[in-house]
């Protein structure tokens, strides 16, 4: 120890099952004897914490975890390719006349790529382009970007990009939601007149999901989970976790706003939630189906079937077995989870984040959960599918059989749902911005540059220094008096 330093030992922490003894050194600069003869002032304390040797953590996962995630991503690409090339959905129809099956149409099987090709051939360009971009190309682009991203340390810019990948990843469920709608719309069961207890003519049209759709959906689920895992384990915008823990003060986000913005936010969230729930229970679309039996039966009769569905009743219809004997229950659970459960949960989390009296730690957890739910809420994707299907369902049905006519009519509740989706997106973005600013003010914001080892080390030293800040203050007060007394004694001896 240097003669001008005062030190002592203490037990700092346990690491690896053993206690480490550390030493603190306090540098004390003696007065300059060659200076002017002004009165000697107490020497200021320069605290050098050489004992706080903090373990350096990587800004990304360890190497073995990177390798594991790489294998999972490659395996997921294989599942995705298999799912895209297997049967995505199948359609079947049958016509009976004079108590005989006069035409039992073959089953039409469609993979994702075959379906896109057939849609382009039939001039259904809007639906085909949506499927090609979001269910054909985008999932592979996302997986390749994730695979490239985990091979290196993640900078804040890459962290932001990964967050956008998770947000846009839900659009890959477009294919599954299209099949959900087809299963409900292509559910035609028309029966003609009955003579002597026998139906003179009847016809039905039904659709069912294939194994390829379930493999494809599984791959998208894994992709979303991996993307979110990478976002949560990387360091982008970083808040001092110690200040989050140490602060016991509870606060509400609404309390950070003035009266008028607070009222507008509360009113907007409540109206959005009420509109969303009410519209999902109200009739959103009607399906008018017609079978032209003139081709099959000399006594020509045109038979109509008109059904009206809300979003909820559509799931109930898809849950029941159709004429093919397929209930499509897994597909129904998927649609209900993405289109109904997640958006309503998002509204409830917005209310919680705004008005719940929570500590800093729970505020951060609630914000992370809100973003997670938002990345899975697919009501906006389903509304796009519904609006596109309105124009292209009649063409698709007529291509299957020219004697079957199916049309889709959008009802006012659907437009109310579109409005609630836009409103929810705007309110969520505004509240996330306010919440981030509030946490930045309360917890201290530290920008992490993963490309610079010095900045990473400095960031973690700052985090650890917050942990010992209260101890440092007490130590300076205790040692300050000791050093002042020592300096006074030295000055008297010099005089």
Image (tube, rainbow, N blue to C red):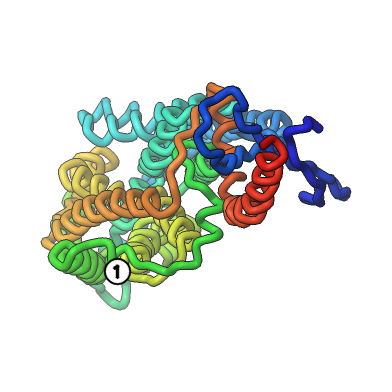
Question: With respect to residue 60, does 95 lie above or below?
Answer: below
Estimate the x, y position of residue 51 in percent, counting from the top left: 74, 39
Do we see residue 241 in this rendering? yes
For this orientation, the residue located farthest to the right is 18
Residue depicted at x 49% and y 33%: 448
Left or right of 43? Residue 346 is left
Q: Is residue 122 left or right of residue 461?
A: left
Location of residue 147 in the rendering, given as x and y in whole percent from the top left corner: 56, 26
Which quadrant holds the C terminus?
Answer: top right
Where is residue 137 drawn, in percent x and y? Answer: 40, 27
Quadrant in which residue 266 is drawn: bottom left
On screen, residue 115 above or below 384? above
Q: Nearer the viewer, residue 483 or 233?
A: 483
Q: Is residue 177 above or below residue 311?
A: above
Q: Position of residue 252 (x, y in %)?
A: 34, 67
Q: Mark 1 sits on what residue? A: 199
Query: Residue 96, can we see it?
Result: no
In terms of secondary structure, where does tag 1 sit? strand
**Residue drawn 37% across the image and 38% down it:** 168
Q: Nearer the viewer, residue 65 or 296?
A: 65
User: If the image is split into quadrants, where does the N terminus sit?
Assistant: top right
Residue 114: quadrant of the picture: top left
Q: Nearer the viewer, residue 256 or 141?
A: 256
């Amino acid at each position: 120890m240097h003669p001008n330093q005062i030190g002592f030992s203490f037990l700092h922490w346990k690491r690896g099952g053993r206690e480490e003894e550390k030493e603190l050194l306090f540098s004390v600069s003696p007065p300059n004897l060659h200076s002017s003869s002004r009165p000697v002032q107490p020497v200021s304390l320069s605290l050098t914490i050489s004992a706080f040797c903090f373990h350096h953590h990587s800004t990304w996962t360890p190497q073995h975890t990177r390798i594991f995630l790489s294998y999972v991503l490659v395996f997921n690409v294989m599942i995705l390719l298999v799912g895209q090339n297997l049967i995505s959905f199948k359609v079947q129809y049958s016509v009976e006349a004079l108590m005989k099956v006069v035409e039992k149409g073959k089953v039409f099987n469609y993979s994702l790529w075959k379906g896109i090709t057939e849609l382009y051939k039939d001039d259904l360009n809007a639906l085909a382009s949506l499927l090609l971009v979001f269910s054909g190309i985008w999932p592979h682009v996302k997986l390749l970007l994730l695979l490239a991203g985990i091979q290196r340390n993640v900078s804040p810019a890459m962290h932001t990009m990964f967050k956008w990948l998770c947000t846009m990843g839900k659009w890959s469920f477009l294919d599954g939601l299209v099949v959900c709608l087809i299963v409900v719309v292509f559910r035609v069961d028309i029966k003609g007149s009955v003579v002597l207890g026998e139906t003179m003519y009847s016809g039905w049209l039904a659709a069912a999901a294939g194994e390829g759709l379930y493999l494809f959906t599984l791959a998208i689920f894994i992709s979303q989970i991996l993307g979110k895992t990478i976002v949560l384990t990387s360091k982008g915008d970083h808040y001092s976790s110690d200040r989050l823990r140490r602060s016991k003060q509870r606060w509400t986000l609404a309390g950070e706003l003035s009266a008028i913005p607070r009222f507008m936010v509360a009113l907007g969230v409540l109206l959005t939630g009420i509109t969303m729930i009410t519209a999902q229970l109200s009739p959103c679309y009607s399906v008018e189906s017609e079978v032209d039996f003139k081709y099959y039966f000399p006594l020509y009769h045109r038979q109509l079937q008109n059904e009206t569905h809300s979003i909820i009743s559509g799931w109930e219809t898809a849950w029941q077995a159709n004429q093919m004997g397929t209930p499509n229950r897994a597909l129904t659970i998927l649609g209900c989870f993405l289109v109904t459960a997640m958006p309503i949960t998002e509204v409830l989390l917005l209310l919680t984040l705004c008005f719940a009296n929570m500590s800093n730690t729970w505020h951060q957890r609630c914000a992370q959960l809100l973003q997670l739910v938002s990345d899975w809420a697919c009501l906006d994707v389903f509304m796009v599918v519904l609006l596109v299907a309105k124009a292209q369902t009649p063409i698709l049905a007529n291509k299957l059989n020219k004697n079957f006519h199916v049309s889709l009519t959008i009802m006012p509740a659907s437009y109310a749902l579109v409005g609630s989706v836009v409103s929810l997106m705007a309110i969520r973005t505004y509240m996330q911005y306010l919440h981030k600013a509030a946490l930045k003010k309360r917890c201290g914001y530290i920008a992490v540059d993963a490309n610079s080892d010095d900045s990473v080390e400095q960031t973690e030293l700052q985090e650890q220094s917050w942990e010992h800040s209260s101890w440092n203050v007490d130590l300076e007060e205790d040692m300050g008096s000791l050093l002042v007394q020592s300096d006074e004694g030295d000055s008297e001896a010099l005089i």
